[in-house]
Amino acid sequence: MSDVDPLSLDLATLSWLAGSAANELLLSTIQKGGHPRLRISHGYVFQMLISGPKTIGTLAEQLGVTQQAASKVVGELTRYGYLTSVICEDDRRLRQVGLSKLGNEAVETARSARTELEGRLLSSLDSHTMASARRALACLLDAAGGLEAARRRRVRYPKLE
């Protein structure tokens, strides 16, 4: 079996491989940065809650999962201390979940890890090449139908099967 030249791969495959490797590196950095229980799937929940607390139903809808699945991950993240539950001001029968202090710290740890990775890239690429890469990946995201979801922080759990 011969080696594959990454430059010979189509952009979709190369971006998936690069994204997967980057996710693994970033998750490892986040875990070593004081958040050992976090998983990549938790990041989807965090992104939905950055703008503020949401009900389980809203979270489930935005993630594209059942309320049972959303409740399960919310319960897990609450037990770990990353989420808090509050009574909804508009309807006191409902509860909303939001990021706790630890949840916000995890978001900051993730942002720092991504900034560090970008810095490593900039040490081997000039800013023009980075801008071109960003444009190419944004065009790929648009062509694949994911641009609006990314813009609105509505990226759903991936359907890999």
Image (spheres, rainbow, N blue to C red):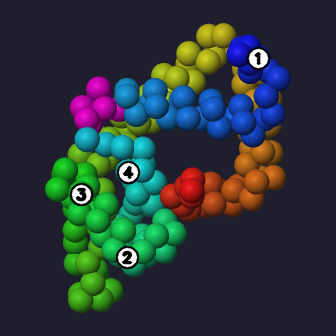
Residue 8 horizontal side relative to residue 154, left or right: right
Identity of the amino acid at label 1? Answer: Asp
In front of the other: label 3 or label 1? 1
Q: Which numbered disc, 4 or 3, marks the residue that appears first in the sequence? A: 4
Q: Earlier in the sequence, mark 3 or mark 1?
A: 1
Callout 1 secondary element: loop
Q: Circle 4 sits on which residue?
A: 42
Mark 3 lies on residue: 76
Q: CA distance from mark 2 to mark 1?
A: 44 Å
Q: Which residue is the site of mark 2?
A: 67
Range drawn in magenta: 30-36
Identify the residue under disc 1.
5
Query: Looking at the rendering, which quadrant does residue 90 occupy?
Result: bottom left
Q: Amino acid at mark 2?
A: Gln
Q: Residues within 10 Å of mark 2 (few under 14, many from 20)?
A: some
Say which element carries label 2. helix
Between the C-alphas of marks 3 and 1, the distance is 41 Å
Q: Is residue 14 above or below residue 68?
A: above
Q: Earlier in the sequence, mark 4 or mark 2?
A: 4
Q: What percent of the width, then of the height, locates residue 158?
A: 55, 55
**Is 108 placed left or right of 72 in the picture?**
right
**Mark whose residue sits in front, 4 or 1:** 1
Q: Are marks 3 and 1 in contact (CB under 8 Å)?
A: no
Label 3: element kind: helix
State the CA–CA distance, disc 4 to disc 1: 33 Å
Give the structural element (helix, strand or loop) at label 4. helix
Q: Can you tell which quarter of the image residue 108 is in? A: top left
- Where residue 142 appears, as percent x and y from the top left, is 77, 53
